[in-house]
Image: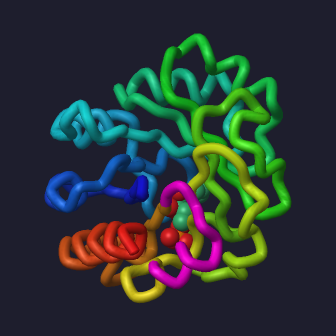
Amino acid sequence: MYVKICGLREPEHVAAAVEAGADAIGFVLTRSSRRVTPERARELAAQVPEHVLTVAVFAGEGPEQVRAATLASGVRAVQLHGDHPHGDFTALRDLGLTLVRAGAAGVDLRCGAFDEDLLIVDAPRPGSGEPWDWAAVRGRPSGRWMLAGGLDASNVAAAIDAARPWGVDVSSGVESAPGVKDTGRIRDFVTAAREAAAG
Ligand SMILES: O=C(O)c1ccccc1NCC(=O)[C@H](O)[C@H](O)COP(=O)(O)O
């Protein structure tokens, strides 16, 4: 089970996610209470070992703005949330980075349909921590897709059972207060997701 922890802002939480065994770590570079500057993302990404994917998260910015911020941050993947057209992914392909498409259950659920490498199927309001009907997408997405939206250590097993994703992505569910990550919750989430996947 692939596990991504999103919205990290502090070195100790990046370290906690790496130690817990996360596969990917996200830095939000778009409008959000979790927003960090590209320079801050670069500092945080520098402490992440090669085997953990570092991801810059955007929502609605044009490809040139995404390109500039991504290069400044030094991450290895770009995540575009919402209604980005196929052309935005095509325009970023030459960066040579992993491309992640993210949207709610109404989007095209075929991973790769927009030439992306990974797909996230999320709640209507990304980063809100609001659970949704995860079972509604069971059997519909294809390829390497992560389930997100309202997950936490207490419900991730049920969510995996309901939707059968390839991976999971979390932000609010590993926070002790809005925008404030919690080391113990990060560890508990990764453990719960891996145990659920192991059966
Ligand atoms: O986290 C944000 O604030 C955010 C803002 C705008 C676009 C995307 C954002 N987060 C993207 C993520 O990948 C989150 O992990 C995902 O939406 C799940 O969030 P949550 O329901 O809080 O676990």
Is residue 154 part of the magenta span, yes or no? no
The residue depicted at 59 percent of the width and 45 percent of the height is 144
Residue 70 location in percent, x, y? 47, 28
The residue depicted at 33 percent of the width and 57 percent of the height is 8
The residue depicted at 36 percent of the width and 38 percent of the height is 53
> In the drawing, does residue 92 fall left or right of residue 49?
right
The residue depicted at 80 percent of the width and 24 percent of the height is 87
Residue 120 location in percent, x, y? 62, 53
Q: Quadrant of residue 159?
A: bottom right
Residue 116 location in percent, x, y? 65, 32
Q: Is residue 54 above or below residue 31?
A: above
Is residue 160 part of the magenta span, yes or no? yes
Residue 188 shows in this picture = yes
Give the extent of the magenta segment: 157-167
Q: Nearer the viewer, residue 3 or 180?
A: 3
Residue 112 location in percent, x, y? 71, 34
Q: Main secondary structure of the magenta part?
A: helix
Q: Is residue 178 above or below residue 74?
A: below
Q: Is residue 165 above or below residue 78?
A: below
Q: Quadrant of ligand 1?
A: bottom right
Which residue is the extreme one toward the bottom? 154
Which quadrant of the rendered structure holds the C terminus? bottom left
> In the drawing, does residue 45 fall left or right of residue 99?
left
